[in-house]
Amino acid sequence: MKKKTISSSMKPFFSVIALFVLSVFSANSQTLLPFQIVNYSPDFADSDVYVGLVGKVNDSVDVWIDFKANSATNPALVPMSYLSDTLHKVKGDWGFAPMFTKLSDIANKTIYLPQISGCRIFLSFKKPLWFHFHQTGGYAGPNIQSSTDPNAGIRFEIIELSNGSNGLWVNTTRVDAYQYPMGLEVFGKSGTTTTYNRVGEFISHQAILQRWQTTFANSVFAPCYRTDLWGTDPLGGIIMQPSKLQEFSETGVSKNYFKGYLDSIWNYYTTNQLVVSLGDMGQYTGRVDSGRLKMTGTDGTKAWINAEPVTQDAIEGKGFLAQDVLFTPSKSADKAFQAQFSAAINRGAIDLTIPGGQPQDWSNNSKYFKKNTFNRYVWFFHQSDISINSKTYAFAYDDVFDNSSTIQNTNPQLVKITIGGFVNAPVAQLSTIIVSPSNPTISTGTIQNFTALGYDSGNTPMFVTPVWTASGGTIDNAGNFSAQAVGNYTITATVGTLSFSTTVTVKAAVVKSNCLLTTANGDFTVQMSTDTSNPTFTFVPSVTGNGDTSCLFFYSKSNTSWNTVGAHTVKPNVPYRISSANKGDLIYYYYVYSLASGGQHNSQASNDSYVVGSCTPATGINDPNDNIPTEVFPNPSLKTVSVTVPENKYMRAGLYDAKGSVKLQTTIISGQTGFVLNLEPFNKGLYLLLLEGNQHTQTVKIVKN
């Protein structure tokens, strides 16, 4: 390819444009988010680590960041242009951009990012990566599948993120390959509470490679460990996602890895009905007809797969699993269901032993990787002794049902990127413990969760696992406190010889005459009827999708013999009438229910009670507004949705698309309990409604059909 050069007449023009764009971005009043890069690696010095970033601002402008100029007050954004391709690896090549900076040259090893989408932070080791900016826009980065790529043999890792006005989404990734252990920590604020989350690997690089080779020595997954381009690297090779291998390609020896599983699914559901609950999408029912898997939601939305996928489709979420089926009106519903199906295949979650017509639960991660054919690369990195909380991003749709390494925070304060994961992280000297929330007030019978965060002598946050104690009431190992008696109680978090205490004030519960009870964890409310005998109980989800997959209701006149009480299958928002309950009877009850985000909860430990016919809960609630869930109806919707909110709880509402771009904003005035959102101008897909107040923040998913 012809060598691209910058003529002397072009250089001043480019400098002016670059300075203009930089000044515009630098003048932006938005607060920059610090990303601290911590090198825990025993294999690389800071001078061996190179840092580069590409992304988009305003959802349209491709940029990179000059990390030599980047600071807490200057993002140092540079527009992506082919005129930046001034570096050359060999004479006559097409040129590369000088976008990488040694970690040792970055002040305080901290970079500062503005609101940015489609962003990737690249960290390469020993050598910088070679990036080419195209004249027509976009860039060419490393291609681990090509032996002729200029980056062949360079080890690197990627952090993916989107940082917008509605918060931060950030993750490590194993979608293409594993090359070196990595970790992430995100510190944020929720009101006065400090929030913390972390993901990543916590065993060493050599331990990961050794376990892989031992586990898959005689497996079709053995070729995933590649050393051909890393033959001289003392750290060994890398582990590639099987879809990146020739062996798993459409012509490879393992091209039919998923064929038997997919054939069985297609054959079984040709004569049997598939019923599956898909979280926010609701329940879908259908079967294979004329080679197509045709599913229909409870609201009539159609979502199809146009033909039986092949192995590559299933692993990468492409082909028949990334297709707008022309026979259906909803492109987004097709692709959303196909993403769920791809995830279920990789996890072996489609259970052919469940009789046709009975609901499948693809969100139950305890059933993943147990039987059927599944993607063993994905299973390997989800092992609980490799990845923290078994979370990683090992294939395109690993985020389905919240199993990926994505951390979302609506008010981030600091992000730490840890090179080497956490196995070699030094043990900092704990100096202080802070308990959140500080001095809260709750009602009798409700549960308050306390969290603790440690700080070292330099005031750097530290993850701690405290021992919780309370001067009265009860508190468990997770910091969940409750009390049945009014009073002030001291809550103490202890780590070693250090401790920190706060006081919780417990007030008498306020009796509600409408018999709507907020449960301890806030996942749902329960509406009782005013019948003086055999009243109805209605499970009302606080989050759309809670209880959709499964919802079991248990009730008894005794609070000590639950092992003899049978389960009653109920549906959210549908009243269930109990029996043998007369006026004055005290009825204890609890629910076991699926979560919209995946998994399930069991409220037996904090079961509630109700006096039949009195409309008076035996255990009550605090603020009446806490009883009123935020409701969005209809959802999904073609045109408008009505939003009902508790009075004086929220002050602002914003609608955001999946990229974090603001689509609508509105102010909620005092006394207002609802508003209408017009979705007609927007494309089909998933949107997030962010509700904000002085003490409360809530995010609700909305689907535009």
Image (cartoon, rainbow, N blue to C red):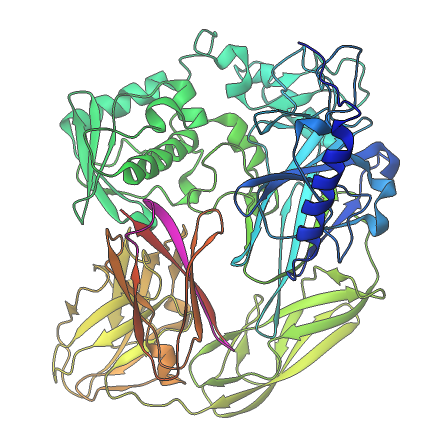
445 up-or-down from 153: above or below = below
- Visible residue check, residue 386: no
Check residue 690 for magenta coloring: yes
Check residue 433 for magenta coloring: no
- Looking at the picture, tell me which residue is in the foreground, 593 or 560: 593
Where residue 512 sits: x, y (%)? 29, 87
Q: Is residue 224 left or right of residue 575?
A: right
Identity of the residue furthest to the front in this view: 9
Magenta segment range? 679-695
**Quarter of image, res 261:** top left
672 up-or-down from 207: above or below = below
User: How many discs appear?
Assistant: 0
Where residue 203 sits: x, y (%)? 70, 38
Name the residue rendered at 54%, 19% in the picture.
Answer: 244
- Visible residue check, residue 359: yes
Where residue 442 sits: x, y (%)? 48, 84
- Looking at the picture, tell me which residue is in the foreground, 357 or 684: 684
Name the residue rendered at 33%, 33% in the picture.
Answer: 338
Q: Name the image quarter holding the N terminus.
A: top right
Q: Is residue 593 left or right of residue 49?
A: left
554 up-or-down from 1: above or below = below
Q: Is residue 692 left or right of residue 119?
A: left
**Quarter of image, res 701:** bottom left
